[in-house]
Image (cartoon, grey):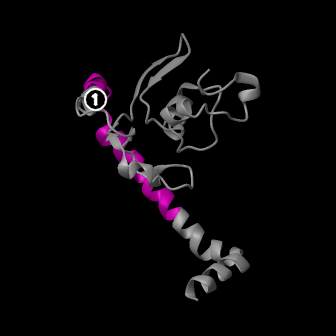
Amino acid sequence: ALYNAATNFATEHRGVFVTIFVLPVSLVFDVVFSVRAWLVFKFYSAPKLHAARVSDIQAQLRRWKDAGAKGKLCTSRGGWQSISPSMRSYKQAASTVNINMYDILELNKEEGWVHVEPMVNMGQLSHFLVPHNLTIPVLPEMDDLTVGGLLMGVGIETSSHKYGFFND
């Protein structure tokens, strides 16, 4: 009965529900993740460790393979960090790989490219490129999308009709 009453209230009075509950929670979420992003960039950013991080991922994959390569393999990133609203229950039974690769490694303005690690998100990339008067041709509208996720999911955006997909 309480569930039905709460669901009914949230549906019938969604404006009030959004204003009182969703907007404040969303603001807190954005502030927390902005502070988290700043802390990661300030204290965890270490482009010089890129080769060691790649070696660590290779070692994790070798251990998985040596153990029989059973089951699915996926990143250890929490399901709550996904943009999709669907549950990520498959991760509970899968073998996971820890991918702590959040750095922008190099910018070559002359040739027009930037070398980044897969967990760099669009907000981080934009904030890095704008002071150089640059942007990427296909810039997703959501700051939280990662380069790795866009490459795996094609990354179609509003400018794709002109510049192609994110991975082009």
Judged from the image, the secondary structure of the residue bearing numbered disc 1 is: helix
- Where residue 88 sits in the image (x, y, percent)? 47, 52
Residue appearing at x 37%, y 52% in the figure: 92
Q: Main secondary structure of the magenta part?
A: helix
**Quadrant housing the C terminus:** top right
* Residue 48 highlighted magenta (yes or no): yes
For badge 1, the amino acid type reads Lys
Mark 1 = which residue?
A: 65
Q: Is residue 141 left or right of residue 162?
A: left
- Where residue 56 sits in the image (x, y, percent)? 25, 29
Q: Give neighbour class at mark 1: few <14, some 14-19, many 20+ (Cα, 10 Å).
A: few
Residue appearing at x 31%, y 33% in the figure: 69
- Where residue 167 sits in the image (x, y, percent)? 59, 24
The outermost residue toward the bottom is 1
- Where residue 17 sits in the image (x, y, percent)? 64, 76
Residue appearing at x 44%, y 31% in the figure: 118
The outermost residue toward the right is 161
Residue in the foreground of this view, choosing between 107 and 152:
152
State whether residue 163 is above or below residue 23: above
**Quadrant housing the N terminus:** bottom right
Where does the magenta region start and end? 27-56
Give the number of callouts. Answer: 1
* Residue 165 highlighted magenta (yes or no): no
Q: Is residue 10 left or right of residue 24?
A: right
Q: Is residue 58 left or right of residue 130?
A: left
Displayed quadrant of residue 8:
bottom right
